[in-house]
Amino acid sequence: MEDSISKDLTCSICLTIFTDPVSLLCGHSFCRECITNSLSIKDQCPQCRTTVPKEEKYLPTSHILKSLAEKAKEAEKIKTKQRDETTGVSFIYLFIDVMSVSESLCPEHEEKLKLFCETDRQLACVICRDGEKHDGHKFKPIREAATSLRRELEKGMEHLSDEIHAIESLANMQREEITKTHVMSQQLMTQISTQFEEMHQFLRQREEEIKNELKEKEREAVEEMTEKFKAMDLALSESRELQVKGTAALEISDSVKFLQSWTEVNNMLTPECLFRPRANDLQVARTSLSLGPYESHLQFFVWKEMLQVVKPRAELLSLRGKNTDVTVSDDLRSLLCTPKKFSFSRENDIYHTLNYSFKTSSFGSGQARSSFEFGSMDASKPSGFGSTHAPQTFGGHFLKYDGQKYVISNQSSVTELTFTDRPRKIGIYLNCSSKELSFYDADKMKHVHTLSSSLMSLPVSAYFNIGHSEDIDRNPLTVCWY
């Protein structure tokens, strides 16, 4: 009977019990992989030779056959296991039958294993319990220990399915993030190549324009020099010809012949006219080829030109505020503390700060970059540089400059930033999507520090606080426009 069932569940192609069985319209069943490979060679059923239409090649799984095949495979495994046991093959099982264990003997004392040591988590006999090895250990009868362990396993199994599902979800999410990272990296690679190509194209075009300008200046200069050279060459030829004629005439001793020879050749021209100095009328055209500032500072000027076509450009922020103790320049780029009334108290510090907050345009998406110049401030004058979000909503963090050092400050701590050279200009870069604010040395484009806050709500504006000291200087905070 079992052999008949196994035969019905056997694939006629691979001659083994079905794996993921599917059925054709003709009624014959095969393993999915077997029939797929067969149909890719010939569109016929391997058993009855019935033609299989192309639209039938997508075959759903036969769940009834799949269930029966799995049971047949399990039965085959049990038969194999029983056959191995009769030949003395040893197996390790996850769960131990309590009745069979109770009849097992301790390998050390050859006593029945009737106890379970909870301390060592192993089976034991009565002699083991009383021995030094298990001194002070806690024991339970085997049946009681098995019941307790089974209860714990059943309780754990109840939540294991949910745990597996949760981990699978996390794994899928992580897999998606890995894919996103690869895609984003490729997009950024393309973006980098595109932007560098734009710069290369600008530089190549500008190089060609400057070279053409040089060639045009060369052409004009050479054309002028050529005209001068032709005039010199003509004068030289005429002078040499005159020299030959004069020498020949002077060799004639007869006065009549001498006069006739000279007047026939030179007609009415007198010697004074013929021998007038001609070199004085000629002048060498000197080389005046020059590219102006491009000749000595080409890279600098082209870099400044390229800033005008760079996209996206730095945000042209404008400072705005209503406090009468602070002066904003007419172009809205510079900020200077000019208090009209101010009383000092030196109880706690050599100076005290009046904080004037000024904000700029708002940003709600994408990225934004700007730079600010602090000038050569007096060491006694404190000056703070706020984040592009109000400090109280950006986790209480902000960048501060007190005339001597830069610090990252919040309500509970102050972290001093160290530099080889103190930055004169600070650049800020805001990434709205990641809610990160980065500070840079704007002259060297070196990263200074990055702040991040998940509490930041968009849109945000840049806020700046300037300080005041008794010894007021006149160096404003200035927005750098490129």
Image (cartoon, rainbow, N blue to C red):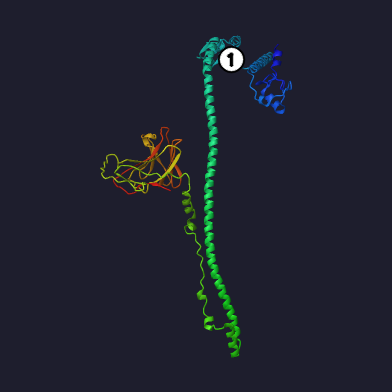
- x and y percentages locating residue 420 in the rendered image: 43, 46
Neighbour tally class for label 1: few under 14, some 14-19, many 20 plus, Cα within 10 Å: few
Q: How many marks?
A: 1
- x and y percentages locating residue 291 in the rendered image: 49, 59
In the image, 240: left or right of 472? Answer: right
- x and y percentages locating residue 93 in the rendered image: 61, 16
* Image position of 197 with respect to 268: above or below: above
Pick the front one: 336 or 122:
336
Residue at position x 52%, y 20% in the image? 162
Instruction: Give the residue type that dot 1 points to.
Output: Phe
**Is residue 442 in sight in this rendering?**
yes
Name the residue carrying label 1.
Answer: 95
**Is residue 410 in sight in this rendering?**
no
* Image position of 481 with respect to 242: above or below: above
Residue at position x 53%, y 46% in the image? 196
Classify mark 1: helix, strand or loop: loop
* Image position of 110 with respect to 456: above or below: above
Looking at the rendering, in which quadrant would you find the N terminus? top right
Residue 55 quadrant: top right
Residue 123 quadrant: top right
- x and y percentages locating residue 348 in the rendered image: 29, 39
Residue 346 quadrant: top left
